[in-house]
Image: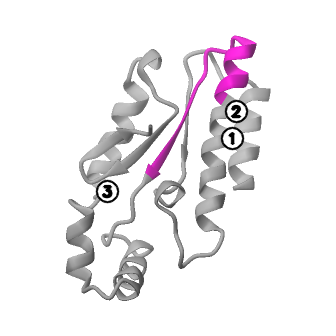
Amino acid sequence: MSGSFHWLREALLEPLRPGSRVVVVSSGAAVAGSPLSGGYAGAKATQIFITAYAQDEAKRAGLGITFTAVLPRITPLTDLGRPAVQAYAARNGQSESEYLQQMGEPLTPEVAGAALLELVRADAATVAPGYLLAGSGLQKLP
């Protein structure tokens, strides 16, 4: 989390050119929780707050920089996600396939890449403060 704080701080202090986009990649655990990983979910939720604070400061200073947070959902298609899916399925007394079925389409690297490109190319006025990134693409956070 402290890395995000320093990165956002520098984006404001330099500052980046007007029209720049800053995307903080957090985790879906920020909204779904992560009971098997201690303070991870809280740290990831903090990234959402500090990204919103950076956006507010950029607006107050008239910098023309857009800040947003993206929260990818857990996916079994990565070395990080696979053991987490296994652990959460076991915790819930489910098979991995049962656990994954309730999650819907898994997030793939292709979907993630396309979604991030879509986000940085979008009109700044339409960019939300945060998004959940799932297999179906970006979904604005409430």
Q: Residue at x 73, y 45 (%)?
A: 5
Q: Which residue is drawn at 27% across and 64% down?
A: 103
Please indicate whether residue 140 sits to the left or right of residue 45 in the image.
Answer: left
| Residue 42 in the image, given as x and y percentages of width and height | 64, 60
Mark-to-mark CA distance, 1 and 2:
5 Å
- Disc 2, SS: helix
In the figure, 22 relative to 44: above or below? above
Mark-to-mark CA distance, 3 and 1:
26 Å
- What coloring was used for the rendering? one colour
Mark-to-mark CA distance, 3 and 2:
29 Å
Q: Nearer the viewer, mark 3 or mark 2?
A: 2
Q: Which of marks 3 and 1 is in front?
A: 1
Quarter of the figure that contains the C terminus: top left
Q: Which residue is drawn at 32% across and 88% down?
A: 93
Q: Residue 53 carries which label?
A: 2
Asked whether disc 1 touches disc 2, contact meaning CB atoms under 8 Å apart, the reply is yes
Q: Residues within 10 Å of mark 2 (few under 14, many from 20)?
A: some
Q: Mark 1 points at which residue?
A: 50
| Residue 33 in the image, given as x and y percentages of width and height | 51, 64
Magenta stretch in the rendered image = 55-71
In primary-sequence order, the first of circles 3 and 2 is 2
Front in this rendered view, residue 73 or 2? 73
Q: Residue 121 carries which label?
A: none
Q: Name the residue under label 3.
A: 109
